[in-house]
Amino acid sequence: MGEAVKLNGNFHGGCPHDCPDTCSMVYEVQDGKLISVKGNTEHPMTRGGLCVKLKDYEKRHYHPDRLLYPLKRTGPKGSKQFKRISWDEALDEITSKWKAIIAEHGPRAIMPNSYLGNQGLVHGLNGGDAFFNRLGATVTERTFCGEGSCTAWLLTVGPTAGVDPESFIHSKYIVIWACNSVSTNLHHWHIIKEAQKKGSKVVVIDAYASKTAKEADWHIAPKPGTDGALAMAMMHTIIEEGLVDQDYVDNHTVGYAELAARAKDRTPEWAEKITGIPAADIRRFAREYATTPPAAIRLGVALERSYGGGQAIRAVASLPALIGAWRHVGGGALQFPVWEHPYKFDVICRPDLIPEGTPVVNNLQLGRVLTGEIKLDVPIKSMMCWNTNPVTQAPETDKIIEGLKREDLFMVSAEHFMSDTAAYADIVLPAAMGAEMEDMILSWGHLYLTYNAKCIEPPGEAIPNNEIFRRLAKRLGFEEENFKWNDSECLENYVDWNSPACDGIDLEYMRKHGFARLKVGTRDDRAPHKNGNFPTPSGKCQFRLDGATNFVAGPFRQMYDGFQPGEPLDSLPDYLASRETSEANPQLAARYPLNIISPKSHGFLNSCYANVAEKIKGQGEQFVLIHMADANTRGIKEGDKVKVFNDRGAFEADARITNDVNPGIVVATLGYWRQLNNGTVNCISSAEFVDMGHAPTFSDNLVQIELI
């Protein structure tokens, strides 16, 4: 599978976790064992440093709870009672069960469920897509994180990488909008801090005082889900006060007149009532942003996580064109640079193998699908789960568990540990970890390709994800060439090495150097939309969209274009209110008066590491941040054990009383394992979608809190 494994030496690594930084790493191997993992000092983003999750990554490879052999369930689902079996027995069991299901119900009764527990091109999100597309299984939309942002971004400015994250060093006014960079984008934060030391002003927009907000020059804290109102009021001010770059707007945008008309009554006073931000602060923010070039916005994923999230992102993504920020190096906006990476998703996923008419289910609504609340023509009788842990990461957790307990559901899980989800599987397969397989790691946060060498053998009988699918494909008689490629051959075929972005780069270069910057300009000269040239149908920034409909970007639905959401979208950006607020639903708010938001944990990577004692110690036991005023009315004191609940479920946590949250808002971070706690935060989360991209409403939920 690529490079031969040597017993000693240093090897190139790429962090496989779901993080925009995609760090370039160095594996140190002695006597065939991984001794240490360090950040690559030569990488301009990684700069030799790793986050608190990864700094002892080698320990995860040798954790005593690691799964080493295939297992078959012997007790009730969820009991974690399994017996060891051979790979032949496991594969025979899986293929015989699937053949029986296909014979009785058809292949649509089988569904895959994966996400970004691994970001590798070969072993990651899309690594099993070709297999399940060939099988004819139901297609799964995977929209945990960023898909609504993608829809809004693509509609507004097209598949552009936007501002190079390294170019923020040249920015004079930096807006971090709904992103806790210190915890979730650390290596970009280092660049922002350098710019700040050089005189750049850093503004963080977040509903609570995150670690990043506390480092900002100015923290603006809108109520959850009201960012769209703030952006529209900024537009109003910029237009009203004559701060528009009219030349740029006239030549490189579509729909300015209509946008100006829409923004006319979206005044700061109007927005103050919605956001809780004083009108004077909104005007000041808009003026500073419009008159301090280069101005750059870093859009965080959390911006999408209320019902109006897509519209909010359209509004924010329109701001740079309005003031001509794109003219400058270090000016514009940054969402996901992955749009300019030369990955061949059609080759990876093989959507041409999908039978016509194949239905689509969404992973956020897994509980509704498995319990029959969502009616399918062919109910799901089997699910394979890898690179994801829906029992902690997906909403409406209690419904998911109810569905996973079905005796007529045959569930396969490929995992590193006996996760909350794997505990309900019928067959558990031991999967290889980062240093044990060759891959290239996708980055959605910078403009580098990142190589990962196989430098140690997996322990026990663990094998890489792609090898699992190769073996299953062989068992099922799939003859397509791609099912016979080894990992190196996959990498040769999964990247467009002939693209201009890969000029001078090939797989051998990657193996030698470990990383390569794409040829898309440098941090000191990249200004991709200085003269417009947006990759939209018009070539311009689309303030106005005529006839646009809702969709989920291809890589998040196995590159399948069938059964897209298709609802008509507003032709212009605007504020769209959340569903669960006192204004939108006063009856619900009377019972559950607190808005809860659930950001990523500092010490975990989604649910990875949340079973590791050292990481739990650093992160702290499951907690909820609550303002003193809300705590006092409930008789809650610091450290008290409390119950957080609504009609969907409940979880227990330690109360932390703090001014980091405003009254009426509570915060509980994501990733804790249910088997180690009494519930987790997604027990209370709704599986309803936001307005675009079928994204989750993780910040659009009401709860009550009481002492236990």
Image: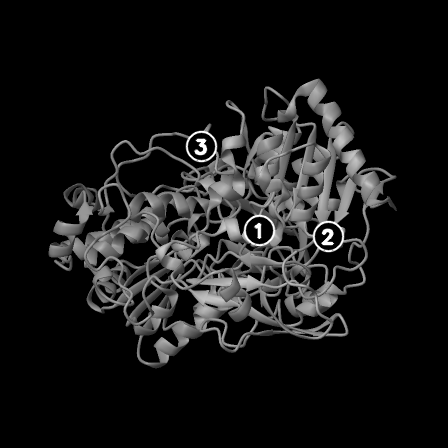
Q: Are marks 2 and 3 in contact (CB under 8 Å)?
A: no
User: Which amino acid, by three-letter code, is at mark 3?
Assistant: Asp
Q: Position of residue 430 (x, y in %)?
A: 76, 51
Q: In the image shown, does 671 or 233 lie closer to the viewer?
A: 671
Q: Specify the label residue 462 is tagged with.
A: none
Q: Residue at x 21, y 53 (%)?
A: 532
Tag 2: residue type? Ile
Q: Which label belongs to residue 489? A: 1
Q: Report whether residue 312 is seen.
A: no
Which residue is pictured at 45% across the width and 60% down the height? 445
Task: Give the class, few, some or many, for how many residues have Cα within 10 Å of label 2's Cα (few <14, many ≥20).
Answer: many
> From the viewer's perspective, is 229 left or right of 435?
left
- Helix, strand or loop at label 2? It is loop
Q: Rate crowding at label 3 as few (under 14), some (14 to 19) or many (20 or more) other CA atoms within 10 Å.
A: few
Which is in the foreground here, disc 1 or disc 2? Answer: 1
Q: Relative to the observer, which residue lies in front, 196 or 629? A: 196
Q: Which mark is residue 463?
A: 2
Which of pointers 1 and 3 lies earlier in the amino acid sequence? 1
Look at mark 3 in the image and give the residue it sits on.
561
Determine whether, in the image, residue 389 is placed left or right of residue 65: left
